[in-house]
Amino acid sequence: MLVDYLELAGAEIINSARAAAYAVARGVPVQCDPCPDLAVALGDLAYVDPVTDRAPWWDPGVIESSGVLGVMGMSVAGFNSSPLGREPVQLVGDGAALGVARRSHREIAYTVLLLTTGECALSYGLEWLAAALGGSACGGCGGDEMCVFSCCPVDGSRELRHLYGVGLLDGPQVTDTQYLPTGHVIATVTFSLAAGVPWIYREPLDTLTGWVNLADGVSISVDPDQVYERCIEPTPCLEDPDCPAPPLPPRPPIPVDACYPSGRDQFLQSVIGLRPVDQPQWLETVPVLEVVTGLTAMRRLVVRFWTDPSGDCAATTDPCRACAAIQVPYLPGRSVLRVDGRTQRVVVECPQGPTGTAAGAPTLYGPRGRHFQWPVFACSTGLCIELLSLEKATADNARARVLMVPRSDAG
């Protein structure tokens, strides 16, 4: 992973191209060759000085901030190893039970250079660095989003990587300080971050970024829950009809929303597809569902997923073969729903008055209003995605989209 850039909670922490440009302009010898197109990929103009560019650390109320020349990345560790592992349990006899493979959190350690024009600027630079690495005030225990590049960027999108649930593990520590004859001071600083979500995410696939106008869907009469009743459940083939096995103890019932609406009604159906060639062959993908309800409340929103190697979604949407489903009983009018498979969080934002916004976390359901499981698609078999919404509760300006985001264990 590229060490020359790091953004945490929307704040630029490391930008070697910016630091090198400011250092050269101030006569600081820099033995570094950062990515030549980094500024272009970030949408920045040519770097001039911290005040003119309004550098992330520059503060008009703190004079010393103009003497900070930037943070230059030197080394990073923690991206190239996978957090996937097992803890085998030794058996009484020979061998061991492998146990379940699981991913722990990811720890990422950085070594950087903090370039300054003097000790006063260095003191402020360390204050700013500690504050910026603390993340956003609203991140809390959930952590923040972190953005890095996998290699020197060309267009700034293909090489961009995201990590989620990121927070400071060990604060900045100065391990070495160089006092140059010119009066400039360069500090070597180390710090480490922890990512609670262990995967490294790419940008969403380009083929599924468009919005679907739900009101333009095909009107069909269906009971989204009743269709599952005709699905044939496999029966054990080794059960002896003349000598059945003793019954197992009863299992706890699966919780079902008592107010979950059901029954046949008129729905609007939209189907979108993703071809196998448009998906990475060796990377998993997760969905991000976004819904804008429009002027009126939306009821009985159903989103179903099918794997589809044939590319013919019209022949694929058999509910018995659906591999995942998202069902939302109710969404208020003028609200925005986001079901994020990257962070496994769901939030609805509703306007409150002329300027305020209220946020809540609605309960998601799977088929028949039962337990919801976060979908993960392991290979490039193609996808068909069906969007169903109750016709009489779908506003003319209601829209939705499903982004598919590739992820990996290392990068």
Image: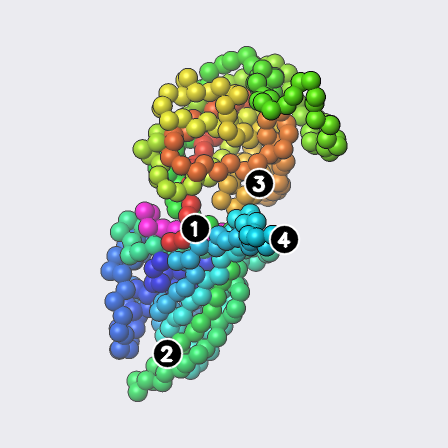
Q: Quadrant of the C terminus?
A: bottom left
Q: Residues within 10 Å of mark 3 (few under 14, many from 20)?
A: some
Q: Residues within 10 Å of mark 2 (few under 14, many from 20)?
A: many
Q: Under tag 4, what secondary structure? A: loop
Q: Amino acid at mark 3?
A: Val
Q: Under tag 2, what secondary structure? A: strand
| Majority secondary structure of magenta residues | strand
- Residue 263: x and y in percent read 64, 16
For mark 2, what is the residue?
186
Q: Residue at x 32, y 47 (%)?
A: 158
For mark 1, what is the residue?
409
For mark 3, what is the residue?
347
In the picture shown, does residue 182 fall above or below 224? below
In the picture shown, does residue 316 fall above or below 181? above
* Marks 2,3: beta carbons within 8 A: no
- Residue 151: x and y in percent read 31, 56
